[in-house]
Structure formats: C-alpha cells, structure tokens
Amino acid sequence: MRKTLGRVIGALAVTMALLGGPWEQPAAAQGVLKIARHQDSTTLDPIFTIQNADIWVMNNMNGLLVRVNREGTDVEPDLAERWEISPDGTTYTFHLREGLKFSDGSPLTARDAKFSLERLRDQEGSVMASMFSVIKSIETPDDGTVVITLNQPSAPFLASLAMFSAAVLPEKALAAADNANAGETGDLEFGNNPVGAGAFMLEEWRRGEVLRLKKNPNYWEADRVKLDGVEWQFIPNDNTRVLKLQAGEVDAIVFIPFNRVTELQGNPDLQVHLDPSSREDHILINHDHEPLGDVRVRHALYHAIDRQAIVDAVTFGHGKVANSFVPAGAMFYNPDNPDYPYDLEKAKALLKEAGVEGLSLRFLLTAGDSVHDQIGVIVKDQLAKVGIDVELVKQEEGQQWESTVAGEYDISVNYWTNDIIDPDQKATFSVYGDDENRSYYTGYKNPEVAKLVEQGRVELDRAKREDIYRQIQEIAKRDAHWIDLYYSPFRNASRKNVQNFYQNPMGRFMLEDTSLQ
Amino acid sequence: MDRFKFVLTRPIQLIPVLLGVSVISFVLVHSIPGDPVRILLGTRATAEVIAKVRAQYGLDEPIWVQYLLFLKNLAQGEFGRSIIYKTPVLDLVGTRISPTVFLLVYGVLLSVAIALPLAVVSAARRGSWADHAIRLYSTVGLGLPTFWLGIVLLIVFSLRLGLFPVSGWGQGFLGHLHHLFLPALSIAIALSPILIRNLRASLIAEMDSDHVIAARSRGVPQARIFARHVLPHALIPTVTLLGVNIGWLIGGTVVVEQVFSVPGLGSLMVSSIFARDYLVIQAITLAFAAAVIMTNFLVDIAIVALDPRIAL
Amino acid sequence: MSLAGLSMRDAIRRSRVPPALWVGASLTLFWIVLAIGAPIIAPYDPIAQDLTRTLSGPSLAHPLGTDNFGRDVLSRIIWGTRLDLAMGVIGVAVPFAIGCSIGLAAGHAGGITDMLLMRVLDVTISFPFLVLVIAIVSLLGPGLTSFFIAVSLVGWVSYARLLRSQVLVLNHRDFIQAARALGYGPLRIMLRHLLPNAIAPAIIFSMSDIVLVILLGSSLSYLGLGAQPPAAEWGVMIAEGQTFMASAWWISFFPGLAIVGIALGFSLLGDGLGEWLGIGE
C-alpha cells in the first residue's frame, strides 16, 4: 500500500513539475500592488509602535490633521483644510474638511481628533508621548473645529502633528477596544482591527506572511487613489526578495542591498528607485569613556577615518559623505558645515598632543549586518595606521541597543531617519544632552548647544531659526559629538509597469499616486 | 504485551519531559541579554515608557515568578500574549503551524516516494549498475547541504524555468502543493539517502532470512513474498529511523523555511528569538518538543502495526 | 548493530579491507592535507580584497573565479577546509567523549542512575536545537565557540544511547559476569572490559556524525549564527554568494561542492569501517 502511495506521489510531483503554472490560482485582482519587504508589521495602533514596518503601512491607512508633502520639505493640509496659529504661537485652530468619514463609514469629527491626540499624550505605553506633552488642552467648539492650546510656543509642533503617531482615529472604536482590554495589557485590540481615514483600509493580515490593504472608498481624496489595493508581503531574505521581483511574483521590493543596485539597473524589466532619504549613518562616540571625552582625541578619530573609502565600499557610490547630523536637503541643513579631511599626520599629531598612546577601542557592531561588518573591518584597518587598536564587538541588534543605552561601548555604528521634517526632534535626541537621552547615549553635553536647542524650539521666525540650527550644526561638528558617516538614498525596485512608486524622505510611500499599467 | 504497555505509558512520560524542556528554555531565553520592549520600541522611547510597557507584560517580576505565572496560565490553556505582535500566542502559533506541518509531511512523503522504489530496486538487483548508481546517490546525497540545494533549485526551477514560485506558501491545497514543492524536494533529497541506506540494508537482511527462504522453497510467488513478508519487516527499522530523525528534520525545516521564506513556525521561532518574544518562543519550543515525543509515540504504534508478531 | 561483544581486534583480523574504506580514507586524507597545507597550496590570500577583479568567472588565474570582493574562490575554499574540518572533528570529538562516558556509566550502573540519565536524554532530544544555538550564540557572541558548546550539549545523546545499549547486552555475557565475580572495581570493568567491546558502533557512527555536524555548522554560518565573515568558511561563502547566484554562480556553487566532497569522504570512511568490522548501519 505504501508503495502505491509512493508511486502516486511520485507521479504527482512529475505532473506538477510539467504543468507548473496552471496549478496556481488566478492572480489577485488587477490593480493590487504587491510589495515585498524585509520586516513584518507588529501592530497598526500608531501610538504603540515606532517600527518602520508599521509606520509605512499606517501612513497609507490613516488621516492626519496635516501631513508632510511629497518632497518632505513642508506640511500640507490633510484632514484639516486650513488652520490658524495665534500670534503668541500657543493656540492652533484647525478647520476640518466637510463630510469626512472613517473607513468604516462613520463620520469623522473634531471629537475624534481631540480623543486621538489626548490618547497619544496620556495613554500608558504611548511611545512618542513626550513629543506631545506640550499640548495643554484641546477644545472642540463644533464638529469641524479643533482648537489646541500649548503650554508654550513650539516651533516644531505642526511638524509633529504630521507624524504617524498623531493619526486621527475613531473615538468609538478606540474607546471600545480600550474598555475591552482595560487591565494588564492595555488596549491592543485596535492594533489588530484598525479603522482609519487614509487612502487604504485593512483587508487581511496574516502575520509573518502578508498584510493586505484595499482601497478606502470613504477617503476624502479617493479620486486620487488608482490602486485597488496593496499587498505587503513579508520576505525577510534579501536574495529571495530580489528573485521574487525578477520572477514577476511581486511588483516591487523595498530595501535592496547596495551591491545589487547596478545589476538590477541593468535589467530591462525592472526599475531601481533611489529616492532621497533623511537617513544619516554615523559612529557614536562614548564621551564618558576616557580619553574620548577629550575633543582632540575625537578630532583625531575624524581625521584618521577615510570616510569616502567607507562610502565607496559600503554604498557602492550611491551614498554621500555626511557633513552634519542634519540630513542633506532637510530643513535647515547647513551645506557649508565645517568638516574634517582625511589626514593621518594631523590625527597622529592630535593624539600626541592629547598624550594618548596605545589606545584600544571597543567598536560595537550589529552581528549579521554585512554593512556593519564592512565598516568594522575598514575602520579597524584605518585606525591601526594611527596606532589605535580596535576590537570589533558584534552583538545581535537587540543586545546592541541595550549596550548603547547602557553606555557599554567606546564607538558604535548607528543611524537615524527623521520622523518629522523639523530638526528639533533629532537635535533634542542627538546633541541636547538631557539626562534621558544623554545626546543619543554618547554623554555629549555643551551648554551652548543646549541653549540654542531650547531657543530653536520656541523661536517662531523661520530665518532666525535657520540661523540657530546652522550654529548648532557647526558647534556640534566642532565638538565632534559623533562621527558623521554618510547620507544614503532609500533603495527600492519595481517592475517596469509600476508607475509613480516613490518613497518620500520621511520614508512615506506615496501609494496614493502609484498605479499599475 | 510488554511492548504494548510501553507504548501506552508514552503519553504519560510527555509531562515531565515537557516540564523539563519548558524550564530550560525559559531560563535560557530569559538569560539572553536584550530587552524585548527595548527591541520593540527602539532607542527613541523614554525609559519611563519602556518601564511601563515592561510592567504591562510582567517583565519586571523576578524570573521564577514569571515562570510560575506562565505555568498557571498554561494550566488554564492560556499561552499569554506576544509582546511583538500583541496578539494571543496561541493564535499566532496556530496560523504559522500549518505551513510547517504541511512542509514536513510533504517532505517526508516525497522522501518515502523517492526512497522506497530506489531501495527496493537496489536491494532486488544487488550488484547491478542500478544498485551502484543508487548507492552513489545515497552516499553523495548524505552530504548535500539543504540550504545550498534549495538555492540551486530556486535558480534553476523558479528563476530560469519559471516552473515554481520563488517563495511563499500559496492558497488552497493545490496552491500549497505547488508553492512548497521545491522546499519539500530539498528536504526529500536530504532525507531520502538516509532512508535508502537503511531500507536497502534491512531489505537485504530480510530477503536472506530463514522464513523468506522457506517461503520461497514452498513455491510462494516472489511478489507475494515481497509484499507480505519482506517489505513489512524491512520497514520497521526505517520507520524507527524516521521517528528518531524527526528532531533533526524539524531543524532542517527551519533552514528550508528561511531559504524559501515559508511563513512557518521555524521562521517565527527565529524572529521571536531575535525579538526576545519570550512567550512565543516558549510555545514553539513546547510545540516542537511535543511533536518529537508524539512522533516517537506514533512510530511505536506503527511498529506494532507492521510487525504481526508484536500485534499478536 | 548486532555482534555486540565482538572485539574489534577479532574483527580486524578476520576480514580484508573493503574498497569503500580505501576510497573514503584517501578522500579524507586529501582534505586533511589541504587543510594543513593551506598556506602553501592556496594561490592567494583568502581574505585579501582586490576590488579591480570582482565577480570574474573561472579562468586560468582564478580557476574557480572570484567573489564580489575580488577574493579568489579556490583559495577561500582551501582555507575553508581548515574551519570546516575543525568544525566536524571538534564538534564530534567532544560529544563523543561525553556521550560514551555517560552511556557506559548508565549501562553499567543501571537502576536509578540509568533512569535519571535517560530522562535527561529525553529532554535533550526533545529540545529544539535551534533555540539552544541561538540562545548560546546570543550569550557568548556569534562564532565557532558557541557552536561547539551547543553541539556538545546536544550531540552526546546518540553516543550515550549507542554505548548504553551495547553495555546492556554485554552485561549478560560470561566474561563480564566473570569480571564482576572476581571483584574488579567498576572503573576497571568499564574501561578494560566494557569499553573496548562496546565502542565500535560509536566510532562508526561518529564518521557520519562528522558529516552531519559539518552540514549543521555550515547551515548555522549560512543563517549568520556560526563562523563570521570575512572568515573563509563554506557556509559563509554560500551565504555571501547567494545574492549573486543568478549572475556569478561560482561563488556559492563550489563551496557547496566542497561540502559534498568532504561529506563523501567521511561517509565512505564510515561505511568502509562498518563493513570491515562487520557492523552494519
């Protein structure tokens, strides 16, 4: 009997190999864009996550009062068609569009906006709560008006409202979910069954496999959306993702390895999208570990590292050496920021001046990340030339973060992509030096910079702000608070028939405009 | 009779072994540096938020308290919630278990489909060129790395010939059969040599045994001897071998799932360990351990069924 | 696995050397020579990058081509022999020693000791290996040390089982009973009487175990948990070359063949030994 079974299966296998395609069910409806990505979403409740994989999906599912424009340079109207800011900069009045609806068809009113923002500020476990603690109160004089009063003027506030966390969600659904789960794990249900006011709505989510969105007919800009749906497939293996695109099983893939860019550009069926990003890669320096607290030693590191060589090797020429912690092209970026040329003699002289000899550094890297491997090997090689011994310490990502937060490193590779267009968030995290973040766990603190960051936050005059942030960039660079490595583009690829597949510098995919031909 | 008793006591042994496995994996996984909440919320979240979320999941309790809580929940059939996916662990594991089971069964069936005829031919025509070729295959195949084979199969059959999908697991039974063919074949090519070697040896031993020679001298037809006496007896050690190898096979499946991006338990386990999603790891570890024990139990039953001497 | 109690010396005296043993031994020797002589035999430095000749196909200068860093694939494979061979041999030697001791002790002592050891064995067998490896790798950092520890924690099981079953049979044999009657100590009985008569199947199994351990090690390196780049390890090479499989197949293809080749050597060696000593699979 077993033998017969074996024969049947053998025959089946052969038949299948011969038939191939016909076994497949017909492809999904026309106009569904299939995108393969390297991470899976974790939740679709915007206040409980900061994972890119969640943010990318939610950007196309939720409506905001104001949103970032396509170029990533300014905010533009979204659910609010216009707004006024009081002269003292503490009162924001938003006027919602007429007839807004959520994806479930229920009306969207000012009360929903109020509830969503208060929840973002107050809910236990809300990740970005601290950025919204500046909100004093929210009033809703009528269904179409939201009045937000701040504790103090806040220049980056409007930009913060354009962040994924500030999505306007239905009060009814949230309150129901919150009540159902009142207790230990808080409100987690909404993240599995979200309702929003964006271009698409959730159709199906099979964790670890696929997240399907369909067009939201109630979206206020529904006429603009050309796709019937979007399918985010989770394909962790870089190679498999590329193969799937080549075989035409998906329409687009995100995050292609730099070393594949040129090859894929040569494929006539495909197009490679290198869209400008706000990503900046850098090497953190732990100022608390002597002698790294000595600015001369940090300068020596800068001079001893040939950053152009790193950019060439790592990004295959698709990146650009960074001269500031603010991304090139971003708001208030200083193109004339001072920089440190590759100069071994100067590095040696500086080390000597600082009386440093036989320095040995622990270089913290993410294990299994080939870019980190490369940077590690190159930096080790280069610093050896000025007599600095580098020990490469590879830790798994989760562990590396723990070590970074705990300050258990000498130098470490890290990167930052902007959440908001305003430089305040990154400046606060990276150079302000508060007790919580200690300038991204480097321990860098310069009272002059701290004062400027505080000024920049409340200064409402754009020209004056620009001047303040240019100063911040210059001083931080002079202090060599960390080593700016490179700016690199987002790197995605799609089939030729995909039109307008574009990721803005904040990482938002502009799928409202994407179409299939 | 003794044998039956042994078979029946097997499920009872399940409990202490699973307890042992759960304690070890709990302690082991919790001792890995790295905090799941930090991994989830990244370096931008404040210490206050991290502490609050940790408290929500009871991660601020001492480890033995967490373990007892886990046991208490388990006794009520609750596996807790995934920290990363924020959904009940049981739901999560439930949706991911089907591709893995499908792949395992598919792989084993394909291996048997390859091994059975080859071993029979090889044993029946000892010394022939076919025998030599099959023995060569079973020796070379033993050393084939599944992940490498998987990549080669992908390039040839998916990319060049376009016969099979590159990854995923498809929809509907036929879709699964089609999508998982190459992964299953990778498993089968790795597993079948072991089965062939074993089955060939026991077939030969069986064919030379006294009762088979006796039957042949009584004039019983060859085919009947083979089907009634030789094959059933020769299958016993092979089935045992299959059972013993189930743990190894599950490990191999994890690798194959990675190569072909199959959304199964293996890839969930890998990502959960990297994310320190403690309760998910705990559930998968227990599921795998239970699978190993249950398979061995089923193998014992199969042996009883295959051997009339024991069945009587 | 029958013929327990048959001394190895008897068996060796009785039969002639089968061809599988010859071929297997020569192949294995070939890989050992390659490993030891790597610095002399390999034409290039295995980790020296030459960005001017990346991804070039097999040629006279580079018989197996170069990879994406311009490193010579042949030289990397030759140097890789060291790592993979060490992986197999150390990854089997330690579990072999541990497993044989435990199996011997359990089989000889019997009773509660035996029962306890068997429960430990049950737990070990049921424990998913990958959880163990990843946990250990995360604790100690990725690399071969973690791999060896993980393999040792798990690999002993098969040897313990083999030795124990042999000893259980031997326990009833006259010469063991006699040794007990003579009042020999347990250590003497175990080492002088039981071990020589029980170890042959374990030795034979260790040959195919080397194959399994090499496969396992390279799989883990492929998953990024074993040897770390830029090390010239075959699994690492396959993983690194995987991205270029469609355009530069030689980077991944040849290391795969090397694994098959080394596995073939040890498999034949094991088969041959088994045949020679009259012990089947």
Image (tube, rainbow, N blue to C red):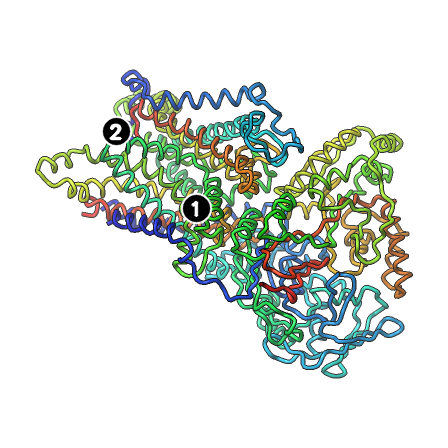
- Residue C232, image quadrant: top right
Q: Answer above or below: position of A36 versus C61.
A: below
- Farthest bottom residue? A142
Residue position marked by numbered label 2 in the rendering: B127
Q: Answer above or below: position of C152 versus A17.
A: above
Amino acid under disc 1: Ile
**Where does the image place residue A439, in percent across and percent down from the top left?**
79, 50
Q: Which is more N-terminal, label 1 or label 2?
A: 2
Q: Which is nearer the eye, A511 or A234?
A: A511
Residue position marked by numbered label 1 in the rendering: B250
**Where does the image place residue A465, in percent across and percent down from the top left?**
88, 60
**Where does the image place residue C144, in percent across and percent down from the top left?**
56, 33
Mark 1 neighbour class, 10 Å CA radius: few under 14, some 14 to 19, many 20 or more: many
User: For the C terminus of chain C, which image quadrant?
Assistant: top left
- Residue A366, image quadrant: top right
Mark 2 neighbour class, 10 Å CA radius: few under 14, some 14 to 19, many 20 or more: few
Asked if residue B272 shows in the view, the reply is no
Q: Chain of mark 2?
A: B
Disc 2 and disc 1: Cα gap in Å?
Answer: 35 Å
Q: Answer above or below: position of C148 versus A136.
A: above
Amino acid under disc 2: Gly
Q: Image check: C23 left or right of A447?
A: left
**Where does the image place residue C28, in percent across and percent down from the top left?**
44, 23
Q: Which is nearer the eye, A112 or B163?
A: B163
At mark 1, the secondary structure is: helix
Q: Chain of mark 1?
A: B
Q: Image check: A210 left or right of A328?
A: left
Viewer-nearest of discs 2 and 1: 2
